[in-house]
Image (cartoon, rainbow, N blue to C red):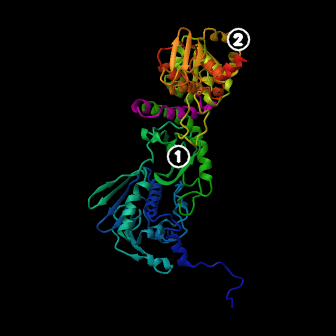
């Protein structure tokens, strides 16, 4: 039979309190050390409200022999009333305390941080002293989680204003884990020092996840108390880079969350946020929804052009210091620099850096070489012909035109491809540096002509027929397998197709668009069955004796067009 109707909400005290002290509430037991430091920061903040000359001081001692962790601060301390109504009352928060006309913006929100201490200990001691009140000593134990057991009074020992918490850690494993995670949680808390006894080993804070070359940031919103952002300092970081900006979110030096920012490559570091601007989750290990990221992103976008402007210093040093560092990676970064007005200064410094880098390919008559913008400017030519980025996959007519231009020793330039496995999450202006040639450096160079726009005119030009006028006569002959495969007699070339090498000459001529045009014509006229494979001859002919006159490089489709 129901004893109370209509029913009301009731609270089972012990299960709720144990919920707040379990890892299903906090992600890891080592969060206890973070909560203790955050409580100290709040206490010192309230003391600074009353005495502005106070300098924050927090000392942490890890005693390995006694397996204790002690946190001492110079905050305002607590009297009996504070301990009864705030520290030991779940849900009461010192963040709501107002001192006179000032209101310290505390980290604490829900008044449950002290319960987290039971993640690593079964009991802890509090020694505290507040101005105008006697010192207080108390022991809190897990037995209090039943909601009925009281804290035990212990001998007060505090002689200076502030609070000391001593946690008696449950196990050596938890003790060591807390030491190991100390630099993860403590990044650059002002006035914080830590050591391990009895060795007196100093524990250093973790600092930034990645050291950066700090920039002067644009005006910051009020809720950003401090920022320390810029491009990654260490050059090795640039070796493998997916392109996501990553920023640590700190509460006055204590790590809370890491935010990834799409497209903002090169941006690293940390920002200290006002904890009261966002409503945190109960355990203060993150933020509800995307409110943090949505507010952080506009500030980071405004800072990104300054970050990229600074990043070129890193890339310059990397290219100078590392012979093994891929130019294609540097090209990838260059192509990733946005070209919108707000990035104007950043794009300018990147363009200046790459003006002297061999980021383009010059296609000569019989060879290829890398070339820079500065070298292109010095070429003795009035026109530069821009070849497609991938000639083999382009229109055959374009390939024919490029071969003719190369044979005529015109200046044919091609863009280099970016490293497609690098900076994989970032949008690019193009995959090839040819885009930069057309869109950034056009005014600095001789006239740039896209081969695509003139290919048909080049291929159909009647004067090109002149190159056939002096072709030697080529004959495919049968001289027996013991005779020479290749014989030059006057103005005639005989190829002995009864030898393996002679047949190979014909076959390779038909597989590669290089070589002597007379030989090519002969293959078309005397071995039409080979006509489907007119592709490979030049390399062989260049090695054979006697040498023959080379009249140029022309694609078979061009040849067929002429013959028709």
Give 490 or 261, whichever is nearer the viewer.
Answer: 490
* Residue in front for this viewpoint, 555 or 219: 555
Membership of 336 in magenta stretch: yes
Asked whether, in this view, residue 53 is left or right of residue 67, the answer is right
Residue 362 horizontal/vertical position (percent): 54, 21
* Image location (x, y in percent) of residue 187: 43, 51
Label annotation for residue 246: 1
Q: CA distance from mark 2 to mark 1?
A: 61 Å
Is the C terminus in the top left, top right, bottom left or bottom right quadrant?
A: top right
The residue to which callout 2 is attached is 462
In the rendered view of the protein, which quadrant contains the N terminus?
bottom right
Examine the residues drawn in magenta and state their main secondary structure: helix
Q: In which quarter of the view is residue 408 placed?
A: top right
**The magenta segment:** 318-345
Left or right for 399, reference 129: right
Q: Looking at the image, do the residues carrying marks 2 and 1 touch, with CB atoms under 8 Å apart?
A: no
């Amino acid at each position: 039979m129901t004893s109370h109707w209509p029913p009301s909400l009731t609270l089972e005290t012990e299960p709720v309190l144990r919920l707040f002290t379990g890892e299903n509430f906090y992600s890891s037991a080592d969060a206890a050390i973070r909560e203790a430091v955050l409580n100290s920061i709040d206490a010192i903040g309230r003391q600074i409200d009353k005495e502005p000359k106070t300098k924050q001081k927090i000392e942490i001692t890890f005693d390995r022999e006694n397996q204790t962790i002690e946190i001492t601060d110079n905050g305002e301390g607590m009297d009996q009333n504070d301990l009864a109504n705030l520290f030991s009352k779940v849900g009461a928060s010192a963040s709501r305390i107002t001192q006179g006309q000032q209101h310290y913006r505390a980290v604490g929100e829900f008044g449950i941080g002290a319960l987290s201490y039971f993640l690593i200990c079964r009991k802890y001691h509090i020694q505290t002293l507040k101005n105008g009140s006697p010192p207080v000593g108390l022991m809190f134990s897990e037995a209090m989680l039943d909601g009925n057991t009281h804290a035990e009074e212990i001998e007060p020992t505090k002689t200076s204003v502030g609070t000391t918490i001593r946690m008696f850690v449950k196990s050596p494993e938890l003790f060591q884990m807390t030491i190991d995670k100390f630099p993860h949680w403590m990044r650059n808390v002002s006035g914080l020092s830590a050591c391990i006894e009895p060795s007196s080993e100093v524990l250093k804070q973790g600092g930034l996840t990645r050291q950066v070359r700090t920039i002067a940031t644009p005006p910051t919103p009020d809720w950003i108390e401090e920022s320390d952002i810029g491009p990654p300092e260490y050059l090795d970081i640039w070796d493998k880079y997916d392109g996501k900006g990553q920023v640590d979110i700190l509460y006055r030096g204590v790590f809370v969350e890491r935010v990834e920012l799409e497209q903002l490559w090169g941006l690293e570091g940390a920002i200290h946020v006002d904890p009261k601007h966002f409503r945190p989750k109960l355990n203060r290990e993150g933020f509800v929804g995307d409110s943090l990221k949505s507010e952080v992103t506009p500030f980071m976008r405004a800072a990104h052009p300054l970050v990229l402007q600074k990043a070129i210093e890193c890339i310059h040093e990397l290219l100078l210091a590392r012979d093994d560092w891929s130019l294609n990676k540097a090209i990838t970064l260059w192509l990733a620099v946005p070209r919108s007005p707000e990035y104007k200064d950043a794009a300018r410094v990147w363009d200046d850096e790459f003006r002297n880098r061999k980021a383009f390919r010059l296609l000569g008559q019989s060879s290829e070489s890398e070339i820079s913008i500065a070298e292109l400017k010095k070429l003795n030519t009035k026109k530069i012909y821009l070849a497609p980025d991938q000639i083999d996959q382009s229109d055959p007519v374009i390939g024919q035109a490029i071969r003719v231009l190369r044979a005529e020793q015109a200046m044919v330039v091609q863009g280099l491809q970016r490293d497609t496995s690098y900076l994989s999450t970032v949008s690019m202006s193009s995959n090839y540096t040819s885009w930069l040639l057309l869109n950034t450096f056009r005014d600095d160079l001789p006239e740039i002509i896209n081969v695509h726009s003139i290919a048909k005119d080049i291929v159909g030009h009647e004067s090109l027929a002149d190159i056939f006028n002096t072709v030697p006569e080529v004959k495919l002959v049968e001289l027996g397998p013991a005779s020479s495969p290749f014989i030059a007699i006057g103005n005639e070339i005989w190829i002995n197709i009864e030898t393996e090498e002679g047949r190979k000459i014909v076959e390779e001529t038909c597989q590669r668009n290089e070589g002597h045009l007379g030989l090519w014509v002969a293959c078309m006229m005397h071995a039409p069955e080979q006509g489907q494979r007119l592709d490979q001859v030049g390399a062989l002919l260049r090695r054979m004796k006697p040498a023959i006159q080379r009249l140029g490089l022309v694609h078979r489709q061009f040849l067929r067009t002429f013959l028709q």
